[in-house]
Image: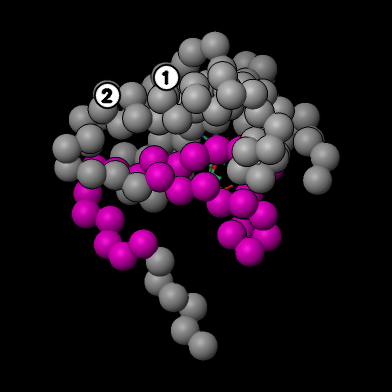
Amino acid sequence: MAYDPNNIFAKILRGEIPCSKVYEDEHVLAFNDINPQTAKHVLVIPKGAYVSFDDFSQDASEAEIAALMRATGQIARDLGVAETGYRTVSNTGEDALQEVPHFHLHIFAGQPLGRMIKPPHK
Ligand code: 5GP
């Protein structure tokens, strides 16, 4: 899938749409989700143009991958949830209902999070 430069996170990265920023470095931007699913819900994105986890894991540089992982841990500590716990999620593609085609990690935190997945019972 080709990267769509008009996706909403690309617009946030270009400063065309505001965001509630919680972290930024050379390779990474993180901001509060506009429609939080938990008490604390942060999105961590690379600044590079990657569609999904699949894309990022294949084509991103070692520096970009390391930066995203390091930043995610740091953000969780800054949120004060490293001790109480949190969940990182990345939805990739159709089966995972990925909405925004720019790779992002969700950080869900600030409350008990329940089971990881509610099975779609057969
Ligand atoms: P996905 O389903 O792609 O994993 O998650 C996309 C997330 O982006 C959703 O949780 C949604 O609420 C969030 N989102 C969509 N548009 C915006 C926006 O304009 N600003 C922010 N901060 N979050 C957004």
Q: Residue at x 55, y 28 (%)?
A: 65
User: Which residue is nearer to you in this view: 21 or 62?
Assistant: 62
Disc 2 and disc 1: Cα gap in Å? 9 Å
Residue range in magenta is: 88-116
Q: Position of residue 3 (x, y in %)?
A: 78, 36
Q: Quadrant of residue 96?
A: bottom right
* Residue 72 in the image, given as x and y percentages of width and height: 40, 30
In the picture provided, is 59 more to the left or to the right than 25? Answer: right
Whether tag 2 and tag 1 are in contact, CB under 8 A, the answer is yes
Q: Is mark 2 within 8 Å of ligand 1?
A: no
Secondary structure under the numbered disc 2 in the rendered image: helix
Q: Amino acid at mark 2?
A: Asp
The numbered dot on residue 23 is 1
Q: Considering depth in this image, is 96 or 38 the residue closer to the camera?
A: 96
> How are the colours assigned in the image?
one colour
Q: Nearest the camera: 107 or 65?
A: 65
Image position, residue 83 (x, y; %): 17, 37
Which residue is denoted by mark 2 in the rendering?
Answer: 78
